[in-house]
Image (spheres, rainbow, N blue to C red):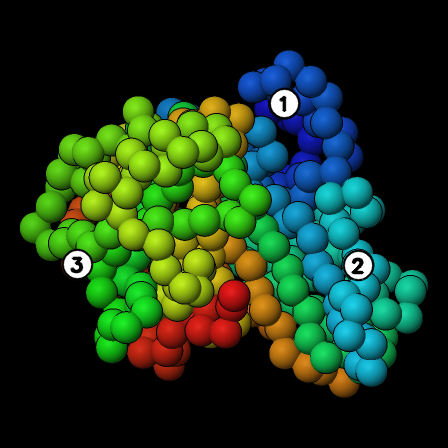
């Protein structure tokens, strides 16, 4: 029964979302009990009838603080093995938290708020000492999507302005390579997005054949690998849109086709934090929208509504 599932369930007329801490829980894809995964284990649309996440879900993987006067990144908190506390904070809200005792650690609060068609997340960080910066990484492991690419407005090298792109993967690789090709989403239905299915040319681990097939399909590489983008990306899950919107410029993105299988891609993001004084708190905001696909104009309206004053700023400009 649902009441026996671990975590905090938030529900409305459209969505059911379950937030978990890193306590061991059952993973049906691998028939195992696994711990150390914090975040959204389930997002279920009542008409779509499927948890859109697989394995680890949308999980908070790590947070690395870099103490001032010390150029070595100190991993004082890695949430995957570290303990995080979970509590329900309201009828439609929950919070994950980790308060570290180590002087160089990174304290973390993640506040979740469920609305009609979206889940907002506010991530707040601070250290007990001066830091030169920090990095966080969140992994979104998707559940059997038929088309593994992401769509976004990104700025490639030697191109003056952001342009509409499809971002894809040839498979896991040591360099985490992302591939890009131009794409025009205007006037397209969800089905128009999935005509050139990347799955047959992808492999769990990239090899010369999958890379050659990706390049032959019109994709190119870029430097930096994670290109600057206009604060959002979307993917197609059946006839629904999975839209991630990021408010602050510190966010970056990453994608790979090889999660559990090629149809379980990872649509990931992180934050490259700036220097901060001891005790100084900084917050970052993102929104996950999941609803029937209604065209790119609807997507852009969602983006403008959430990004507000940041609508014209790029994310990920200083990421390698």
Residue in the picture at 28% in, 62% down: 153
Q: Which residue is mark 2?
A: 75
Which numbered disc, 2 or 3, marks the residue that appears first in the sequence?
2
Q: Is 198 or 50 nearer to us in this picture?
A: 198
Residue 227 x, y percent position in the rendering: 39, 63
Residue in the picture at 74% in, 56% down: 97
Residue lying at the far top in this picture: please name it. Answer: 31
Which numbered disc, 1 or 3, marks the residue that appears first in the sequence?
1
In this rendering, would 184 be left or right of 302? left
Visible residue check, residue 168 = yes
Q: Which residue is mark 3?
A: 297
Label 3 neighbour load within 10 Å: few <14, some 14-19, many 20+: few
Residue 93 x, y percent position in the rendering: 59, 52
Measured in 3D between alpha carbons, the distance from the residue under mark 1 to the one under mark 3, in whole angstroms, is 37 Å
Q: Which residue is mark 1?
A: 27
Visible residue check, residue 47 = no
Helix, strand or loop at mark 3: helix
Which numbered disc, 2 or 1, marks the residue that appears first in the sequence?
1
| Quadrant of res 303 | bottom left
Helix, strand or loop at mark 1: strand
């Amino acid at each position: 029964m649902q009441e026996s599932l671990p975590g905090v369930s938030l529900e409305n007329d459209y969505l059911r979302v379950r937030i978990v801490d890193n306590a061991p829980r059952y993973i049906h894809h691998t028939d195992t009990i696994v711990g150390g995964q914090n975040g959204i284990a389930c997002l279920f649309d009542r008409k779509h009838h499927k948890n859109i996440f697989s394995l680890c879900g949308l999980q908070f993987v790590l947070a690395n603080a870099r103490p001032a006067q010390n150029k070595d990144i100190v991993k004082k908190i890695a949430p995957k093995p570290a303990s995080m506390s979970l509590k329900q904070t309201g009828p439609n809200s929950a919070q994950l938290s980790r308060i570290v005792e180590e002087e160089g650690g990174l304290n973390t609060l993640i506040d979740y708020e469920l609305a009609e068609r979206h889940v907002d997340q506010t991530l707040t960080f601070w250290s007990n000492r001066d830091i030169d910066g920090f990095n966080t990484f969140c992994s979104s492991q998707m559940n059997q999507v038929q088309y593994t690419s992401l769509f976004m407005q990104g700025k490639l090298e030697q191109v003056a302005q952001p342009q509409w792109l499809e971002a894809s993967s040839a498979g896991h690789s040591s360099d985490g390579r992302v591939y890009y090709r131009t794409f025009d989403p205007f006037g397209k239905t969800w089905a128009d997005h999935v005509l050139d299915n990347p799955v047959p040319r992808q492999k769990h681990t990239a090899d010369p054949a999958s890379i050659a097939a990706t390049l032959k399909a019109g994709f190119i590489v870029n430097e930096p690998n994670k290109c600057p983008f206009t604060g959002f990306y979307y993917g197609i899950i059946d006839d629904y849109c999975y839209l991630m919107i990021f408010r602050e410029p510190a966010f970056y993105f990453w994608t790979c086709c090889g999660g559990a299988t090629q149809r379980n891609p990872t649509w990931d993001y992180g934050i490259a934090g700036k220097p901060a004084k001891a005790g100084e708190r900084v917050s970052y905001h993102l929104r996950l929208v999941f609803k029937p696909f209604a065209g790119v104009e609807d997507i852009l309206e969602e983006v403008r509504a959430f990004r507000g004053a940041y609508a014209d700023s790029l994310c990920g400009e200083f990421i390698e």
